[in-house]
Image: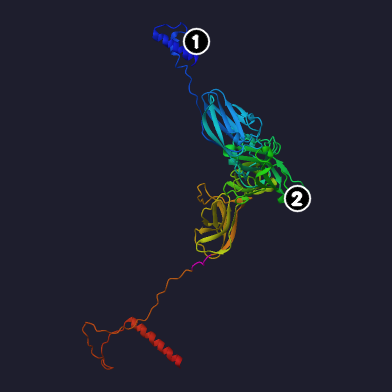
Amino acid sequence: MSHATVTLAVVAALLLSGVAPVAGLTAAGTAGSTAGALDSPVSAQTEEASGSFTEGNLTVTRGNEVTIAVSHSGSGTLTIGGSEYGFNVTVDLGGSGTTEVVLDTRATTASDPAEFIDGGSATMHSPPLDEALEPERYLLRLEVDGVEQDLSTLTVEPRGETTAASFRAPESFAPAEYTGGGEDGDADVGPLEAAMSEGSTVARGDYAVIRFEESGLETALNESDLTGSAAANGLKLNFTQTDPGPNHAAREYVATDGGNVSVLPSFSNDRLYVLWNTSAVPIETQSGRNQYQATFALTDESGLVESETTLATTTFTLEEPSMSLSPVEDATHYPWDNATFPVTGKTNRAPGTELEVRLRSPDPNAFLQLQDATVDQSGTFEAAFDLGSVSRGTNATLWVQEYFLQTKQKVHLVAPDPSVRIDNQTANGTAIEVGAAEIPNGGFVRLEDAAGEPVGRSDYLEPGRHANATAELSTPLFEAQRLRAELVPADEDESYRANVEPYTTDGYVVNDTAVVDFPPAPTETPAPTQTATQTATPTPTATPYPVVTRTPLPPSGATQSSVPLSPAVAIAAVLALGAFLARRGDAS
C-alpha cells in the first residue's frame, strides 16, 4: 500500500473517532488544509492509458511513402515489422496526442532510420536492407505506458507496370511556370494537359512530351537529375538517336538541367510528364536518322532493382517545320467581292501553336494588316482580312510571319474599268442579249439606235461581272440595224434614271455596237374594191298572189299599143347588139 493511501486511511479513522487530524497534514504528506485533503482523492487517481491507429490497416506501393497516424494518451512506442520480417524498427512517441509517422519504403536501405522515418524517434533493430522494403504484410504494434493498445497491418504492394505515351506541345508552352504549382510538391499539370496533343512526329522547335503512368517512384524523383546516378536516386531518362548512320555516334539527350528536358510530376495521379525541347536538335536529310527513342529506366542506385532495368520506352520522329498558306477562294479580289478576305493554311507545328498572318502593300496607299491564327488538331489554321477600305489597283503580299519563303502569296487588289460587250444577233422577241458587262458600282445596260435614241435597257445589275444579261426593247424595231449598248450608273436606290450620264473610261463612253436583225416591217394592205356580179335569174316559185292572164300579141301589121322599154333595158340591148355584130365581123 502506498504512503498516500496509508495517510488517507489514518485521516479517515481519526475523523470517525472524533480525533482531529494534525493541522496541515495532507495525502501527499505536505503542508495543506484538512479540507484540501478531503477534496483531492478523486483527482489524484491515474487515468487509464489508451492508444489506437486512426486509419486502421494501411497499404502502400513499394517505393512510395506511407503515413502511419497513431493517437496515444501518453508516451508510447510504435513497432513496424519485427525480427521475423527482416525489418524491425521502433519509433518512440513522446507525450500524448496524435503523431504521424512517415515511412519512405524506397529509402529503407539506409543504415540510419532517420533517413526513411519522419516523426518520433526511430531505432533500427535489424540490419540495413540491400533493397527497398519488399512487398509483404507487416505487423504494426502500438504500446502506451508499456501496455499494448492496438494492432494493425502495413501491406507493401509490388510496383505496377510503367507505361509511356507520346504527345507534343507547342513551342510557346513554358514548363518552368508550372513547377510545384500542385499539391504535395506536384506540378500544376492542368495547362500542359490542355496544351498537348497525341502524336509522335514533332516539328523541330516543339516539345516532345512523354506521359508515364508510374508506380512507386514518387520519393525517388529528382526533377533536375535523371541520369541514373545516386543523386538521381537511380532514375534514368534519355533520348537516343536510333540510327546515327555508319561511323557516327548516336546523339543522346539526358534529362538534366542543361539537357533541355523538363519534368512535371503528378504523383497524386501516378503520372510523370517529361518535356523535351527540340529546338536545338539538328535535322538530318535522311528521315530515318531523325528518330529518337526515349527510355525510362531504374539503376541499382534506386534500391528497387539489382541492375539497370528499363521501365518504359517510346519513340519520336523529328522533322523540319512546314507551312503553307493560300486564299480560301481566289488571289484576285474585286471591289464587289465580300470585304472579308479569308485565308487558310496547313502546318506540322503542334496544335495550339500561335501564328501571325500578314498582308502588306506599299503602294499606292500603303497598309499592313496583322491577324492571329491558331493551329487546330488537324494542323489547319485560318485568318481573315478586311479589304473594304484598302487601296485598289495594286498587289499585296500575304505570308506567315517567320515563314516568309514558304508562305508568300500575291493578292491582286483589282480596280476594274467598266466594260460592256454586245454581239451581232437575231432578236428573240423583244429581248436583246448582252454578252458581258462589268459594272464596278452597279447600274444598267442602255440600248440606243443609230440616231442615238434610247430603245431599251436591262434590269438593274449588281456590282460585278455579268454574262448573258438581257435588255428589253422599249419600242418596236424592224429590219436589220445597228444598236449601241452603253453602261449607265443607277441612283442610290438602284433605280433607273433616263438622263443619267454613262460610265466613261479615260474620257470615253463605255459602249459597244452590234448589228441586230429584227423582223421586216409589215406592208400596208389597200382596202378591197367592190365588183359587179351577174345575178342569176331566180326560179319562179308559186306565190299566193292571183295569176294574171294576158292576151297574146296580135299579128304583125296590126295596130296595138305596147309597153315601152325602160332606159336600162334599152342600153343593155344596144350593148348586146354591138357584141353580136363584133363576133360576126371576126368570123368573116
Q: Which amino acid, mark 1?
A: Gly
User: Residue at coordinates 51% horizontally, 24% vertically from top-left?
Assistant: 73
Depth check: give the residue in front, 268 or 545: 268
User: Residue at coordinates 48% horizontally, 20% vertically from top-left?
Assistant: 46
x, y percent for residue 446: 54, 55
Depth check: give the residue in front, 477 or 314: 314
Q: Which amino acid, mark 2?
A: Gly
x, y percent for residue 497: 51, 50
**Residue segment shown in magenta:** 518-522
Depth check: give the residue in front, 397 or 554: 397
Q: Which residue is mark 2?
A: 245
Mark 2 surroundings within 10 Å by alpha-carbon count, few (fewer than 14), some (14 through 19), many (20 or more): few
Q: Quadrant of residue 36?
A: top left
Asked if residue 211 can be seen in this view, the reply is yes
The CA distance from mark 1 to mark 2 is 96 Å
x, y percent for residue 255: 69, 39
Q: Which residue is mark 1?
A: 29
Residue 296, relative to residue 437: is it above or below?
above
Depth check: give the residue in front, 359 or 95: 95
Asked if residue 174 can be seen in this view, the reply is no
User: Residue at coordinates 40% horizontally, 77% vertically from top-left?
Assistant: 531
x, y percent for residue 174: 64, 37
Q: Quadrant of residue 17?
A: top left
